[in-house]
Image: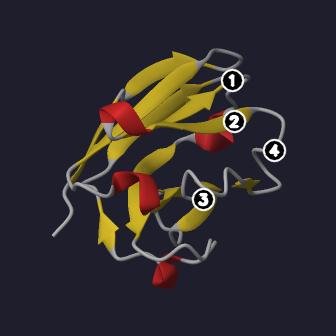
Amino acid sequence: QVQLVESGEGLVQAGDSLRLSCAASGRTFSTYTMGWFRQAPGKEREFVAAISWSGGGSTYYADSVKGRFTISRDDAKNTVYLQMNSLKPEDTAVYYCAADLTIMVDTTTAGYDYWGQGTQVTVSS
């Protein structure tokens, strides 16, 4: 069982930055693929970013956030981060952290085994 706890929610203005954190339980965190997804009201949950296990070190981004968001991980702290810069009102959503216990990076919700409870990000214009 893996538990994920997100933090860093906030209400910011367009153009501002915000960093989300996700702390994970589990002794083998370094082998997990970690992802961030988001869900806006009335919309389906969508992929934002993913980072492969530490041995791979690859990152993946949705086109809508590429160049503005950065995903990273600190295996010593069992934590994955999402640095969000140049935020836009359309980034407003509940952001979810997810863990995939395989080494295959997936950009769909079906590819992830565990989910956090979500954290709210609101960007005003």
> Could you tell which of marks 1 and 3 lies nearer the N-terminus?
3
State the mark number for residue 69.
Answer: 2
Callout 4: helix, strand or loop?
Answer: loop
Give the Cα separation between the discs numbered 2 and 1: 6 Å
Give the Cα separation between the discs numbered 4 and 3: 17 Å
Callout 1: helix, strand or loop?
Answer: loop
Amino acid at pointer 1: Asn
Residue pointed to by mark 3 = 52
Callout 3: helix, strand or loop?
Answer: loop
Residue pointed to by mark 1 = 85
Identify whether 34 is placed above or below 88: below
Residue 86 lies, in percent from the top left, at 74, 23
Quadrant, the C terminus: top right
Which circle, 4 or 3, is nearer the viewer?
A: 3
Amino acid at pointer 2: Phe
Give the Cα separation between the discs numbered 2 and 3: 16 Å
> Could you tell which of marks 2 and 1 lies nearer the N-terminus?
2
> Could you tell which of marks 4 and 3 lies nearer the N-terminus?
3
> Camera-side residue: 27 or 12?
27
Give the Cα separation between the discs numbered 1 and 3: 22 Å
Q: Label 1 near label 2: C-beta < 8 Å?
A: yes
Amino acid at pointer 3: Ser
